Image (cartoon, rainbow, N blue to C red):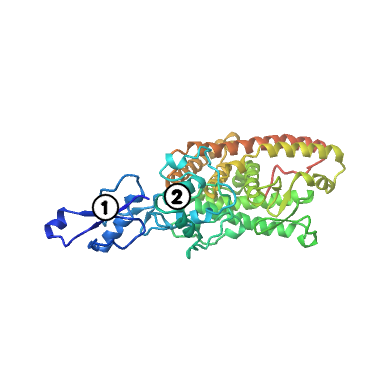
Amino acid sequence: AIPLVVPTYAEPSARERESVLLFTPISIGKSTPRQGESEPSLLPSLFLCCLSQSPLRSNRHASVMYTATKSLQCLICGTPINHAHLGVDACRACAVFYKRHATFRKPLICRRGTNDCYEKNSKPFCRKCRFVKFAAILGQSLSEEEMTKLQSQPDSNDQHSDTSDPNSIESPDDENQIVFLDHRSFSLTPSSSNESYFDRMKRAYSMLCVIRKCGELGTNPNPMSLDDEVELVGDGIKFIPTTYSMKLPNSRIMFAGLIQFAEACFDDFKHITTESKHFIVNISFKMLSSLDGAYRSAHHFPDNQTMVSGYTSYWNEGMIESYVESCPFKINRKEVIEELKKGWSRSKDMNDFKRVNPSNEEFVAMMGLSLWNNDILAQSDEYMEMVERNRNEIMSELHKLYSRLGISDYAARLGELMCVLVSIEKMNSQIEEDLQLYKLMNLFKEDFGKLRC
């Protein structure tokens, strides 16, 4: 361990107090002077400031006296702090994060794949590099035995249970953040008087989840009549198998909810005509539905190939035959099953959402960009100013988000998010082609193209 240097006085004169400091090294973690040394006579605030400053930050011998007025910063994320945690200059959020992940069973993975994010950025880019940076700093100041002891100590302020993927982007104070957006995260009132742009969008998305949950529970088959074997339990919700008859009602509920989502997010959307609202959401509906399904599938069923087809229903390759059996039309079941399996395989291979694993803020930003997509301009230039204004606002908020997280080189991350949207768009184009084939096979004869609420 690097020796810590603490200033001491041997009854100095007034002149000596101004010009001379006698430094005596002591070991880290010891607050009492060695035999023969005098007690520190500086003010307590100045003594504590020296005790927790640069010796833990650098391999060089400390030779500069920090003043009592210099503010402390977390060595991991740069957040201003008043107190040290786990024996180093770390904020409570980073300390809690380290202790929680020190015994995390699932291995952490660097988002860049280079394992050097913490070296290239002032703030860690991903959870693994945040953990490695904390471990490196902590390892400089504490022995292995002391580290084990600190990791096992409960934090009285840590009431957070981590159920999110360990490799997603998180902010330094994410212990107070919502891990997953659904009907349970909805609040009628803003979380604060100065609600941020993305907080507003997250609250609107939670409202959409409430609308879908209530609507589907009222129209779907009674879950109580199903066997436990066919039900799947996600995070706080039971999913039932998708049937053919559920598709159109669930789509109508989703459409109505998206109207409310857009009105809650964007002020200019509120003031356009009902026909214009329907026009915009109709064009964006497939993109928004697919993005929402990818987000919720990645959370509820991260380790298998099950997909969320509605808010309360699921779909996978193994249930294609039973899905076809529920179709009321006269069809060639063998051919339909074969084509549905082909379509399932294509859509599964094109889904990059789980790999990129967007944060909640990134997800709602992607929802906003999907709503204000370029297809609207291709259909009508009447909404050009509105589309460009809202897209620019969303991108500006993303820049602010990455700046706040300390991610200076975020072009690659933005590229990943855009690639997810492109892959979903390609998948929807392929699904549209498949849908035309299914209609020729007497399947999906209902009109899904023009939904109304």
Relative to the observer, which residue lies in front, 142 or 390?
142
Residue labelled with disc 2: 134
In whole angstroms, how far apart are the C-alphas of marks 2 and 1?
23 Å
| x and y, in percent, of residue 317 in the image | 76, 43
- Tell which residue pokes out farthest to the bottom in this image: 156
Q: Residue at x 62, y 39 (%)?
A: 352
Badge 1: residue crowd in 10 Å (few <14, some 14–19, many ≥20): some
| x and y, in percent, of residue 378 in the image | 59, 34
- Tell which residue pokes out farthest to the front in this image: 35
Does residue 256 appear in the picture of this structure? yes
Q: Residue at x 28, y 60 (%)?
A: 34
| x and y, in percent, of residue 256 in the image | 65, 52
Seen in the image, is 264 located left or right of residue 433? left
Q: Residue at x 15, y 55 (%)?
A: 18
**Mark 2 residue element:** helix
Classify 106 as above or below 237.
above
Looking at the image, is mark 2 or mark 1 earlier in the sequence? 1
Query: Which kind of residue does numbered mark 2 sit on?
Result: Phe
Does residue 195 appear in the picture of this structure? no
Q: Residue at x 16, y 58 (%)?
A: 17
Seen in the image, is 427 located left or right of residue 13? right
